[in-house]
Image: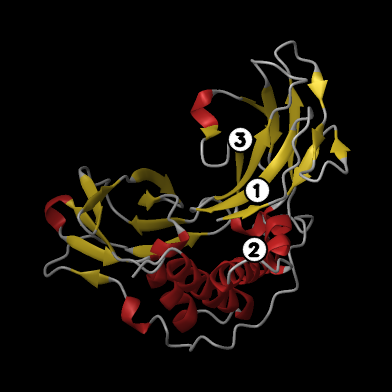
Amino acid sequence: VSAEFEEDEDAQSYISSASVSVDGEIGVNLYIKLGNLIGDGAYVMVKGPNDTDAKKVELTDEIFDTAEKAYKVSSPVYAPQMGEKVEFTLFDENNVQHELWNSAKTNSYETYRYAVNDYIETVQNSEKASEKLKAIADKMQNFGAWARESLIANNQISSDTAEIAEPKEVTGVADNIFDSNTVGKSEGFDVEGLSVSLFLDSETALRVYYTGDEINGITAKHGDETVALTPGTSRDMNYVEIKNISAYNLGDDYVITFGDKGTLKVSPYSYCYLVMNKSTDVKLQNTVKALYEYCEAAKNFFNKQ
């Protein structure tokens, strides 16, 4: 999802445009054009909200975007962190720091700071942005705002997490919208203590817990495509996790095969069903309904069925 800015050619290095990624981790992307004041071997130090130390990103051909004619430098953030600034600092091969200019060349920055919410507000205020782009920006913002509210209320993230926007109550999504997304088990399914969770304070990840001994050889598919599973243990239970689910796949079914013990059909919306039917947490209920609107806007934007 990208927004173009005006270009002005000169000798300075500048930000030509920005975009966000809508994978499970929402990525902040800046497109940097190098001026003739900096040569080969340049790099950017990038510090996101989850980084203890800044990370070095070398400006090589591997991250050069031919369509943008610029280097794409990215940093992931989580849904409730859409208001958190990512810091970008430019250096040449001799470790000399260079300023980064905005696209209009009106301001320069020793460290350029940019958040997902900055991009969203640019789209919201743009006369050129399409209705589809504005829709996904609005729904993404409201989902992030509710995720932040809910996770702070449940002590899962710090109350110092930067504000995104005032969350808007989700009134256009029926309470029974997820009723068709219950967990489905094959006949004779023989796995005990099954439960489902969706993680929004990190990568958007679907986790399936089970009790008893660890089961080897668990596999998963998304349609005909094999999906990587991450196994682990937590709260004295085993689990398998599908990480980094894209916004437009949040309503999709995943089929998990537990060896010879049977198969499970489950979706991120299966967790949303549980929230709407078993939780009294109004903030969490608004979060999953906002998640639904974000998913639908993403499917519409990317023309997904």
The disc placed on residue 18 is 1
Front residue of this view, candidates 270 and 167:
167
In the rendered image, the vertical position of residue 299 relative to residue 175, given as above or below: above
Q: Is residue 251 left or right of residue 255?
A: right
Which quarter of the rendering shows the N terminus? bottom right
The residue tagged with tag 2: helix, strand or loop?
helix
Tell me whether circle 3 and circle 2 mark residues in contact (CB < 8 Å): no
Upstream in sequence: badge 2 or badge 1: 1
Q: Is residue 260 above or below residue 182?
A: above
Q: Which residue is mark 2?
A: 151
Question: Label 3 sits on what residue type?
Answer: Ala
**Numbered label attached to residue 70:** 3
Secondary structure at numbered mark 3: strand
Q: Residues within 10 Å of mark 2 (few under 14, many from 20)?
A: some
292 over 87 or under it: above or below = below
**Where the C terminus falls, by quadrant?**
bottom left
Picture coordinates of residue 170 (x, y %)?
60, 83
The residue depicted at 23 percent of the width and 48 percent of the height is 218
